Image (cartoon, grey):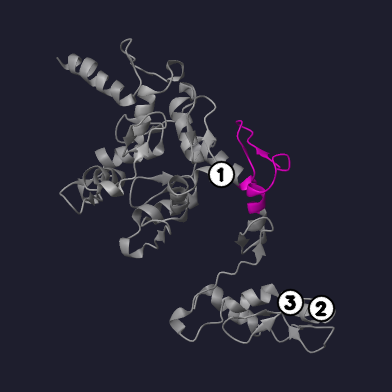
Amino acid sequence: MSFLNNFFVKTERNFNCADDIEPFTCKTCQHFQTHCLVQLQEHGINHKSEVSNLQIKKCEECNFETYSDYLLSRHNYFCAPTNPQELKPKKIYRFPCEQCNSRFKRRHHLQRHTAAKHLSENEIKWHQCPHCTSKFKEKGTLKLHIIAKHLPEDEIRWLKCDQCPSRFKQKYRLKYHVDTVHVLEDQIQWVKCDQCTSKFKHKSYLRDHIIMKHLPEQKIRWFQCDQCAAKFKLKYLLRRHFSAKHLPEDEIQWFHCEQCSAKFKCKSNLTSHFRAKHLAEDKIRWFQCEQCVFRSKEKRHLQYHISERHLPEDEIEWLQCEQCTSRFKRRSNLKMHVKAKHVPESEIVWELCDQCPARFKQKRSLKQHVVSKHLLKAKD
């Protein structure tokens, strides 16, 4: 039995208190006694029912009845089905949102949900960052932002992963990393999509997947870049785009590789670089294709490979260009096509060569140019 279950069992029964401590007695019936003031208050609800229209709450597993949501939720934690193997804490959602179907176990979770989802712009009490223009609906989020963005390097207490070089400023990020990256296959609690065969290690991955793949067009909340025509279904994709394309050079927060001189604007790119270039052979987790000898250090590369080589024509999710008849298997290829063929000259963010006047629409074209024109010639 878990600590929480055990705690509620003890509170439902008598406390093992010292003999000289006098219990609380109900003044209405003079019979009920307890050493716990909360229990006395909850017991009082039963007397209030005599003069009010309170609804009786019943346990689904036994004959227990009460007028109190709290007592029912506490009872349900240790009231087990007949089979002991089915003994699991029940999820009690006592606080329903009045504006949608969401329900919560704690009042402050409901308050946080209401502030995030249902308050109008002028009703929100914003928490302004003293160091930049960022503002947040929750004070806790502001604190996390300051730790992540503004805390001096010498004051950061890094939390290191004991299975890879990753490190984090917040404990929940380290836990999230371990749960999604290092958890053993047979210990993963998969979260499955009910609209396709996809499954994920974390609820947030499933939520993003549904928004990207299954949400009807009319329900999508687009995040529009205010510097160019780009728009995104997920807010973090807009932030990543802005950092990569529009942030001034002196404001970029570079992610430096500790093993070489490489640096990246996105942390995910640094992680991919480390796996590809520096991870010891015996620590590499290969993603093997089940239909051929192809394998990759990156799961997305395996997914690209399967889509390109093995997926039947009728199962391919084609990405259609909205401005012509072209279609693509990869979103990145669609983006490159749009940038090359349909973006007006005045809106293009050019990739400039720092060694000659050449410029390119695609970053990979710039890289190919640098290698072929400047690196190889320098070696010759």
Which of 172 and 65 lies nearest the eye of the viewer? Answer: 65
In the rendered view, tell whether residue 211 sits above or below residue 258: below
Q: Which residue is mark 2?
A: 48
| Residue 76 vertical placement versus 206 (above, below) | below
Which portion, as a residue range, is magenta? 112-140
Check disc 2: other Cα within 10 Å, few if <14, some if 14-19, many if 20+: few
Q: Locate residue 256: give its quadrant.
A: top left
Residue flagged by tag 1: what amino acid is it? Leu
Which amino acid, mark 3?
Gln
Query: Residue 96: which quarter of the image?
Result: bottom right
Tell me if residue 124 is in the magenta stretch.
Answer: yes
Q: Is residue 223 visible?
A: yes
Circle 1 is placed at which residue position?
A: 144
Within 10 Å of disc 3 (Cα), the crowding (few <14, some 14-19, many 20+) is few
Q: Sequence-wise, which precedes: disc 1 or disc 2?
A: 2
* Residue that badge 3 annotates: 55
Residue type at the position of mark 2: Lys
Q: Crowding at label 1, few (<14), some or many (≥20) Cα neighbours within 10 Å?
A: few
Most extreme residue toward the front, as rendered? 325
